[in-house]
Amino acid sequence: MIYIGKISLWLAVFISFICLIAIPFILTGRGRKKQSQLKNCYWGLVSLGGLLTLSTLVLTIGFITNDYSFQYVASYSSPDMHILYRIAAVWAGQEGSMLFWAWLVAVFTAIIAFKKRSEIDKLNSYALLIMNIVLLFFLVVMVADSDPFVLAPLGVAAGRGINPLLLHWAMTLHPSTLFIGYAGLTIPFAYGIAALLIKDSEAEWVKRSQKWTLFSWLFLGIGIYLGAVWAYVVLGWGGYWGWDPVENASFLPWLTGTALVHSFTVYRRRGGFKLWSLSLAAITFLLVIFGTFVTRSGVIQSVHAFEQNPLMTALFGSFMAIIILGSAGLIISRLKEFSSEEPFESLFSKEFLYYLNNIILLVSTFIIVGATVVPPLTGGNLGPGFYNQIARPLGFVYVLILALCPLFAWRKTNLGRFGKSLLYPGILGIASIVPLYFYWESLEDQVKTVSPGLGQNFLGYIGLIVAAFSIFATIYLFTSWANQLKKQTGKNYISAFFSIFKKSRSRSGGYLVHFSVAIMLLGLVGSSIYATEVKSRVKDAGDEIKVANYTLKYKGSSSSSETSRDVTSANFDVYNSDTNELIGEVSPRTVFYKTQQQQTREVDILYELFRDIFVILEGQNSDGSLGINVFVNPLVSFVWVGGAILIIGSTIALWPKKKAIASEGAKEVVEEIPSRLAKKRKKSKSWK
């Protein structure tokens, strides 16, 4: 089995190299058989998807069957691991994750090559060439440093398994969804470079890559979301985002990817933001490689990062240098062809808010990159406090822009009409100030009861108001749209409301994403600014821990021994201190895994609508008492709910339409007619 995987891997290297030589040779030549020759190259790229699928399947079967002749399987699998965790172990280490990533790039390349085999033109051909170059880079990395098909030494009877902290459902999906996002972001980069190479500033490259970009951005977001869930329920530190370098590495391309999605909208609909789109496509892909560099090279230390590897540092460092120099050189050399963006007619326009959107996201990105890279290299370290001080005000302004942008018009907004559209969300936003103030006061009091020094400033209250206004503004957009459809179609209000999501999926899905960000802001404000923490000890049954308006009464501990692990639990009843009502039980645990000789903490969380009681068993002290750490995290459920709505909204925006419906659909068809005619004209000239 292992030799099948290795042979298919080397065949992929060979075919990828042949395509690297053949495609530019054919494109720059003068032969009359370009179409048929390129079609053969397209089929070669399709075969790469098949070969790497075979390699990945071989490695997966090795894990499923516990084939310890694979050195990689012996390092990351064990007989007592559940089959789902054995499958997830395929991408748990350096070698497997490189193969998985290369497989995804190969599959996406194969899909595009297969779909475009009868639509062969320069744009598709150069884009596929760039994707093949990226794929070849990962193949070279594997054969040079990270080959998953290495024979294990003789005498290996069983593996040690993966890190016990990774034995959680979220971690079976978190890395794979991130990799799908990473691999998919190769596509807008490839089409952007292709457009630069052929000097085609039309929006065709955007149309061909826009859905792929949103798809990749969605999966990258799902991966970040799952990582936050895992960090919250497994790592046992009370939070879900700690601004760790590897966390930042996945967040950075999501930020610039957000700007890219918005820039594509302006490019496609208005013919603007051309340089923005090209630059963001290159920057986003660069940050994908940068994230891999941070994780794989070991240059920056992190609990998530791999050990230091000089060869990986050299390979990824060189690749990033090529991306920077190549992309920047092409963009600068094509400024004349792509600099046709119209200036803003008014600050009160969608274009200007899209511009602010990009500026905020890019500034945030550069700050995070600098804070992630510079201090560790100079021997320092910036904690979460630094990032939060910058992220909070920028985040509040950004959410406000998201709320206002749909209310603005293209080119210039009629201020009278804007005032009318702002009326209802404005009134509701102002009306929320008083109840939110009392709620903010209760949160402040909750924190101050623990330590007077933990009281926060007025910024948290401002964040609650911004979130509330943004929620009302988005609800207004949906309700006014539904009312308009009700009048036009004669449907009842409920039918009209749900037809919104059929009428214009991209627009309704986008509104839903904006709504989700406002929901998440409530959770981020509550759980990051007003989280309450108490550290205590318990020894005898009846000992109590008081935190905020809760009392945890210790009932005693229990222990059990299993084949692969020893478990110790501390059991508590949780009471409301004001009413003395029993509201639940928690039993945090420590688990010692015998095979890995590693101890982990399994937190227990009592979930409520507006707050979580989060309890950690730190371990046993020298005097026999147990160390207990208790957090009360307000509004954290809104983070999870908002993230779920974001996924739903993005999926709606991605969902393919069978045909254009009603006025919005008709508008889109009308807008596409000139581009289709232009496309036909260009096709006839593409090889002259």
Image: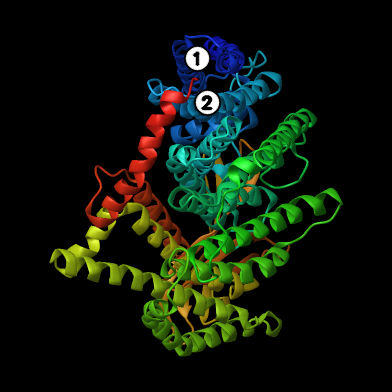
**What distance separates the C-alpha of mark 1 from that of mark 2?**
10 Å
- x, y percent for residue 456: 65, 80
State the residue at coordinates (64%, 66%): 391
State the image coordinates of residue 120 (x, y, percent, origin top left): 44, 22
Figure check: 402 above or below 373: below
Q: Which residue is mark 2?
A: 128
Element type at mark 1: helix
Farthest residue, direction right: 378
Image coordinates of residue 505 in percent, x first then y, are 32, 53
Amino acid type assigned to the residue bearing label 1 in the image: Cys
Q: Residues within 10 Å of mark 2 (few under 14, many from 20)?
A: many
Mark 1 touches mark 2? (CB < 8 Å): yes
521 with respect to 416 (left or right): right
Q: Is residue 286 left or right of residue 417?
A: right
In this rendering, is residue 655 above or below 309?
below
* Coloring scheme used: rainbow
Asked if residue 410 shows in the view, the reply is yes
User: In the image, residue 572 lies at what x, y percent?
Assistant: 50, 69
Q: Which residue is mark 1?
A: 41
Q: Is residue 78 visible?
A: no
Residue at image location 63% in from the left, 14% down from the top: 151
Query: Mark number for residue 84?
Result: none
Question: Which of the two residues, 627 or 684, is positioned nearer the viewer here?
Answer: 684
Identity, as a three-letter code, of the amino acid under mark 2: Leu
Q: Circle 2 — which element?
A: helix
